[in-house]
Amino acid sequence: MGKNYKGLEYNTLIAWVEDGIGYSQMNRPKAFNALNLELMEESYDLLMRYQEDPEVKVIVICGDENAFAAGADLKAVAGYNAFEARNFIDQVHKTLFAVEDNHKPVVAIVRGLALGGGLELALACDIKVVADNATLGLPEINLGIFPGGGGTQRMPRHTSICLAKQYIFTGDFFNAETALKMGLVNMVVPADEAMEAGVKMARRIARKSPLALREAKNAVNMSMNTDIKTGSRLEQLGWSMLFSSEDQKEGMNAFLENRKADFKGK
């Protein structure tokens, strides 16, 4: 397993591709993977490269066993003026939309701390596999600010507006089981099994048609931002368009012939 994707060298990430999965591992362990401008810029660059790489079917974003990401790097942002703060959060939004809008499904594997911007990053991912030792929360209110990386938008879309306001207004932490009950995450697993479980999920998804996955992801995302009739029309367009693909023919023929489909993304 190489840890140097196509010869690229990142200061804040470890990147590699294996079995159709593109890994983006945040690598600022001394700062508990706190988000700074460089990490956001490098993450955006890698996400765009993975999106255009046909070898990559699914993207995995993870940290280490201690932290997914412990929020914004306060040493970097505390002294910002208003314009510097706006420029920083602009890059955060750009990167998180590169996750949410990426043509490839994105799986977050969360271990340890996922606070502030770290939780906001996880919320932008499609699937969240969370270790039972994870601590999550949006504690920005305790710093005299509030979540600025999409937390006020994605949190109520994932759970209820009541719970979103509760945790945003109090800044309280919560554990993995609470996150599961709230509907914020897909599954909770033992900490020492989190990477294995997340990769297993990514591999399952990677076996599907890349074209169908792209259209399905877009249709589901659009359901959160449009009325049901508009969303259904968008769904109809994506669904119909797939009938011009080789993958649709392969998938249906494989079913009829009682064999496994071999999707090519064409």
Image: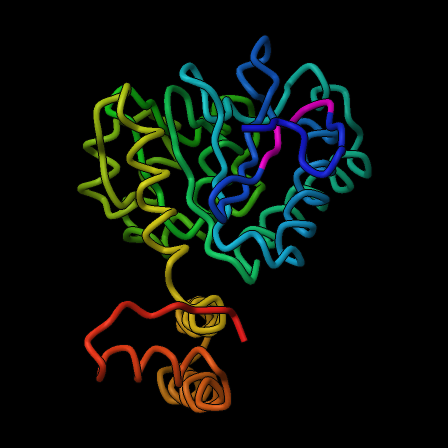
Q: Looking at the image, what colour scheme do you see? A: rainbow
What segment carries the magenta color? 11-16
Q: Residue at x 32, y 52 (%)?
A: 204
Q: Is residue 15 magenta?
A: yes
Q: Residue at x 73, y 28 (%)?
A: 10
- Horizontal side of 231 relative to 9 (left or right) equals left
Residue closer to the observer: 191 or 86: 191
Quarter the C terminus occupies: bottom right
Q: Quadrant of residue 132?
A: top left
Instruction: Give the x, y percent position of residue 127.
Output: 36, 48
- Horizontal side of 77 relative to 26 (left or right) equals right
Q: Residue at x 57, y 42 (%)?
A: 149
Instruction: Give the x, y percent position of residue 73.
Output: 63, 21
Q: Is residue 4 magenta?
A: no
Instruction: Give the x, y percent position of residue 137.
Output: 38, 29
Q: Residue furthest top?
A: 30
In the picture shown, does residue 52 fall above or below 68? below
Q: Residue at x 40, y 82 (%)?
A: 248
Residue closer to the observer: 130 or 264: 264
**Secondary structure of the magenta portion, mostly?**
strand
In the picture shown, does residue 139 fall above or below 200? above
Instruction: Give the x, y percent position of residue 101.
Output: 56, 60
